[in-house]
Amino acid sequence: MTASNNAAPVHAADAISRSMTFFLAAACGLIVANLYYAQPLVGPISVALGMSPGSAGLIVTLTQIGYGLGLLLVVPLGDLFENRRLIVSMVGLVVLALLAAGLASTSTLFLLAALFIGLGSVAVQIIVPLSAHMAPEAMRGQVVGNVVSGLMVGIMMARPVASFIAQYSNWHTVFFLSAAVMVVLAVVLARVLPQRVPAGKTSYGALLASMGHLALNTPVLRRRALYQACLFSAFSLFWTTTPLFLGGPAFGLSQNGIALFALAGVAGAIAAPIAGRLADRGLSKPATAGAMAAVALAFIITHIGAEGSTLSLVLLTVAAILLDFGVSMNLVLGQRAIYALGADLRSRLNGLFMATFFIGGAIGSALGGWIFAHGGWPATAWAGLALPVLAFAYFLTEGRKVR
């Protein structure tokens, strides 16, 4: 794939339209949802493909590994190749992987498809920096926030949507329907996205090598990535363990009940556009503190009320909203900060930023499952609280020159 010299670059001075912002948000939500459709379907998929209980976790793990590889190896290409072509190519890869997953009759084929679903889904992390390129400086945070809100809605809607579809049909249908949606989306993306040819002419090897230099010599990137790693670890810990908690003896919720609970978290996505506007007004620092406080409060209130009580369930629902609010807000604040470091670096900076906190999310999932198995929800909630507290302790060291 080579960038065309004839393609016109995106001009950030031109204000991005509301309809384009909405479309980019919707595209991000639809694409990122592919990472999460399999999570509530691990049981039926593993049974159908003859996987042991011990290996069933690979269904989710391989998708995450693919996404992680894409963040480090594919997303930086946004600083080298024409962005529209790269985005459409990755969505095309997702289509093929979804079809392979839906048709899979063996665990090996499904797991390979899961890997490529994750790899192709990094298209969202090329779209988000592109939206920053399309926005003027004065409203860049607002635009990024609006686009990221679509991404967060996609994350939170994927699990309940997959559960509902599988209940009335089967797990194969989930992947086939998503493949059809991705085909339509790829066509629309190819038609409406502007072309953007990066100015850089470096080689791919030099591009990857430069990421190590950026990670070591960009304090704002390191700080914002570590803030988000702590908060996203708390997010993953919460959403890994609450289905187990709600489906256990204390609450005894059905799969549909758990899916409805997950829908409550979508309300937290309203934080993204709010965060963008605050960042544009120079209020990133107090907004960051507020995001961390929201995540901490989410875990604190879950200790109130007896397990299984109506009060406890209500407070868990409020906690889900607060948690998603805080994580969404800090994500946008972080991206707004790193995108200001240079237009020619945005894809690489975004790849490093996302990869760092994605590792935090993986640690949170593993940690949450182990703690819940050994200490139940009280121990899990205390562990979750420790993560935003750790982020806040680091935040207190932030110098006045770090924005």
Image (cartoon, rainbow, N blue to C red):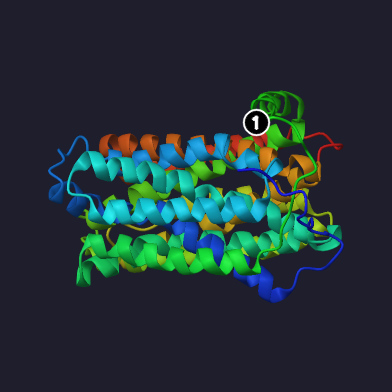
Q: In which quarter of the image is residue 261?
A: bottom left
For residue 227, say whether it is visible: no
Judged left or right of residue 259, residue 266 is right
Q: List the single residue furthest toward the bottom.
A: 19
Report the quarter where the N terminus lies: top right
For residue 345, say whether it is visible: yes
Which residue is disc 1 drawn over?
Answer: 204
Q: Where in the figure is residue 166, as x and y percent of width and height?
A: 24, 65
**Foreground residue, 366 or 165?**
165
Q: Is residue 103 above or below residue 66?
A: below
Q: Where in the figure is residue 238, as x and y percent of width and height?
A: 41, 48
Q: In this view, does 20 lie above or below 51?
A: below
Q: What residue type is labelled 1?
A: Tyr
Count of numbered badges drawn on the protein? 1
Tell me the element at label 1.
helix
Q: In which quarter of the image is residue 273?
A: bottom right
Judged left or right of residue 369, residue 197 is right
Q: Residue at x 48, y 63 (%)?
A: 30
**Foreground residue, 96 or 70?**
96
Judged left or right of residue 98, residue 70 is right
Q: Residue at x 74, y 63 (%)?
A: 142
Judged left or right of residue 183, residue 339 is right
Q: Quadrant of residue 305?
A: bottom left
Q: Residue at x 85, y 57 (%)?
A: 137
Report the quarter where the C terminus lies: top right
Q: Is residue 161 above or below residue 95?
A: below
Q: Where in the figure is residue 103, as x and y percent of width and height?
A: 23, 55
Q: Where in the figure is residue 88, as x and y percent of width and height?
A: 55, 56
**Foreground residue, 285 or 249?**
285
Q: Mark 1 Cα within 10 Å, few/some/many (few <14, many 20+)?
A: some
